[in-house]
Image (cartoon, grey):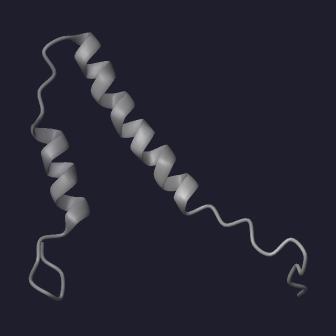
Amino acid sequence: MADANGMADKNLSNVAEDLERNPVNSHQAQQLQQDTNDRRHQDALNHDEAGDQANPKTV
């Protein structure tokens, strides 16, 4: 897939690269999975917005 600029979708290309990796043994498989989990966790932290605690929005 491509975006509006004609460039390949970065997320899709990363997933394809991850799927191409074949772990040699269970230890390497666990390491690859942990790398994925670490990236997801960091991404979640980067998108976690606490908001303005001094002036909370009221509905």
Q: Is residue 23 or residue 39 the one in the foreground?
A: 39
Q: Is residue 2 or residue 31 the one in the foreground?
A: 31
Q: Position of residue 6 (x, y in %)?
A: 9, 83
Q: Position of residue 18 (x, y in %)?
A: 19, 41
Q: Position of residue 46 (x, y in %)?
A: 53, 59
Quarter of the image with the N terminus is bottom left
Q: Residue at x 12, y 33 (%)?
A: 21
Residue pushed farthest front? 54
Number of numbered markers? 0
Quarter of the image with the C terminus is bottom right
**54 in relation to 20, above or below:** below
Q: Is residue 13 left or right of residue 30?
A: left
Q: Residue at x 31, y 22 (%)?
A: 31
Q: Residue at x 11, y 77 (%)?
A: 7
Quadrant for residue 2, please give it: bottom left
**51 in relation to 28, above or below:** below
Q: Residue at x 33, y 20 (%)?
A: 30
Quadrant for residue 48, please give it: bottom right
Q: Is residue 57 left or right of residue 34?
A: right
Q: Position of residue 32 (x, y in %)?
A: 28, 28
**19 in relation to 33, above or below:** below
**11 in relation to 30, above or below:** below
Q: Is residue 29 left or right of residue 35?
A: left
Quadrant for residue 27, please give it: top left
